[in-house]
Amino acid sequence: MNHDFFGETFVQLVFDYVFYYPFLMAYVWIGGGIAYALVFERQRHLAVDPLPLLPATPLVSVVAPCYNEENCVRDVIEQLMRTRYPNFEVIAVNDGSTDGTGAILDHLALEYTNLRVVHHQHNQGKAVGLNTAVLMANGEFILGVDGDALVDPDAIAWMLGPLLRSSTVGAVTGNPRIRTRTTLLGRMQVGEFSSTIGLIKRSQQLLGRLFTVSGVMAMFRRKALLDTGFWSLDVLTEDIDISWKLQLGGWRLRFEPRALCWILMPETIRGLYRQRQRWATGGIQTLIRHSGELIKPRHFKMWPIFIEYLASVLWAYAMLFVLIIVLIRQFVPSEWHAVGFWPQWHGVLLGITCMLQMLVSLWIDRHYDKDVLRYFVWTIWYPFAFWTISMITTVLAIPITLMRRRGKRATWNSPDRGAIDAKPDPATAATPE
């Protein structure tokens, strides 16, 4: 009898955790995002020219590692050359591309005197490309951008501000916006990036620590990179790893929502899954690598980020357990049938909460993407699609990480870029209200 009681209690606790963990965290992100927006994103803070706010205009080195980006790289470089910041150079690294990327970059180097091109003979990975470019860079501040990112003309100025105002800031992350919006998956990701990246970063900023800078566009202080040993070569998500290394080394990170860039994202289930599996595996790699250092008392400010990430991993396994129990319900002890196997009122409440989180995040981001609220209707599919993918990829991430050969270099794979001809509409994007 006691055994059945404890079994039923355990199952009920797992079911409660599956539903109430995302429910409670959603309100944490909502509250933090609203607080950040009220303090730092009032209208008078947005409609300003960032250049006069800078105390100086030091040289900024923009580094762009590229692999098989022939369809994107010309737009990326030409957009960089439209920046309003007056003092910058661009270093593009062709990391063993097998398409026409190298030839396009060489041609662009003849057009732009502040563009240098480096060619790697073989695919060595994004981290190697970044490290190579930084070693060649002349600037004290390094802006890393992806080979498919269209950077807003004012992004450099907005990101440089926090670095110039405080010598303890090691990196500033920007605000990536989705430009592939032709399919259901693309439209759902518009809401996802606002709610799970923008809203969470705003909340974490109030705590003083970020889980990660956005690898698609982030600016670093060269001294901070030297202090932490640059990007690790064997981690699938070099952005998460460098973020934790910087913060464990005593450097602070900042989120700047006015620094915009427009990126391509997968618009197929297969492409989305591959991307999220890489993200999940890289996160677990970082967690395992830095856990020993993180638990030390002097790093207590990182504990909320650390604990929340552990809780999200635990949620994925709890969700898997719930699904298994539901599938084999007829074979489980009869005493367990009293447990709510199917979401009832609390499931509905969780769905409403998820939609509220989406609405708040899109409402805040309307300053930077004027049509973003129109994608709210597509977010109704978000919990089913993305929570399912998140559960699967997180559960698989641990065995993949443990089986991965130690020290194996993380090289490029050509990703699903969705609609590669998608470009931001100047009438709706890239300029804060």
Image (cartoon, grey):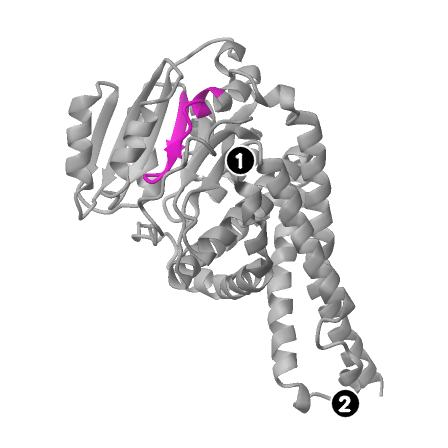
Circle 2 or circle 1, nearest the eye: 1
Query: Foreground: 48 or 244?
Result: 48
Percent coordinates x, y for residue 250 in the rendering: 58, 30
The residue that mark 2 highlights is 334
Percent coordinates x, y for residue 377 in the rendering: 58, 53
Q: Compared to 324, does 138 lie above or below?
A: above
Q: Earlier in the sequence, mark 2 or mark 1?
A: 2
The disc labelled 2 sits on which kind of residue?
Ser
- Name the residue rendered at 22%, 21% in the picture: 112
Secondary structure under tag 2 reads: helix
Q: Compared to 62, does 100 lie above or below?
A: below
Quadrant hosting residue 312: bottom right
Residue 299: assigned label: none
Q: Magenta span covers which residues?
A: 141-157
The disc labelled 1 sits on which kind of residue?
Lys
The residue that mark 1 highlights is 370
